[in-house]
Image (cartoon, helix red, strand yellow):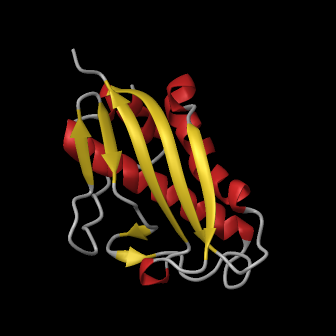
Amino acid sequence: MYEQKLREMGIYPAETVKPLAAYIPAMQLGELVITSGQVPVKNGELKYAGKVGVDLSLEEGVAAARLCAINCLNAVRDLIGSLDNVEQIVKLTGFVNCAEGFGEQPQVLNGASEFLIEVFGDAGVHTRSAVGVSGLPINSAVEIEMIVKVKTD
């Protein structure tokens, strides 16, 4: 059902982003899958670089957050085999590369949150933190971590 929804949206199949350093994309602990921070990379290329509100518009920040969420889901899929095994998106932690005084981090992260609700419905409703930072790896505009509860039966 979720895999089919992503196909209909033209998103699936997609490849998991290779780690940028010494870590793994995701780890399962019991019924929870925790992803490493994912940046807006597609086909091996950073799609959104720089500071949101300076180098990038709010709309581009929203698109970057959506791509980060897609990359988190790809990491989850690689670990559990199918996103149809997702029971609930539990939490997102999002970091927005932005200038001092920028206060629209929640709106940026809505790019990820609204996408997850579109795909998973009620199972996509989650808790969230949206944090502004002065820089991110490879000058990424956004980085997102995700915690997902999976079916274990």
Residue 100 appears in the rendering: yes
Residue that appears at 51% across and 47% down: 92
Place of residue 35 in the rendered image (x, y in percent of width and height, measured from the top left)? 34, 51
Residue that appears at 28% across and 58% down: 16
Q: Residue lying farthest top? A: 153
Place of residue 145 in the rendered image (x, y in percent of width and height, measured from the top left)? 43, 54
Name the side, left or right, on which 10 lies relative to 83.
right
Place of residue 126 in the rendered image (x, y in percent of width and height, measured from the top left)? 56, 35
Give the vertical position of 108 relative to 1 (above or below).
Answer: below
Residue that appears at 60% across and 80% down: 134
Res. 3 image quadrant: top left
Identify which residue, 29 or 76, lies in the foreground. Answer: 29
Image quarter of the C terminus: top left
Give the vertical position of 19 relative to 123 (above or below).
Answer: below
Give the vertical position of 108 relative to 115 (above or below).
Answer: below
Image quarter of the N terminus: top left
Q: How many marks?
A: 0
Residue that appears at 39% across and 36% down: 148
Place of residue 137 in the rendered image (x, y in percent of width and height, measured from the top left)? 42, 78
Give the vertical position of 97 relative to 81 (above or below).
Answer: below
Name the side, left or right, on which 107 lies relative to 128.
right
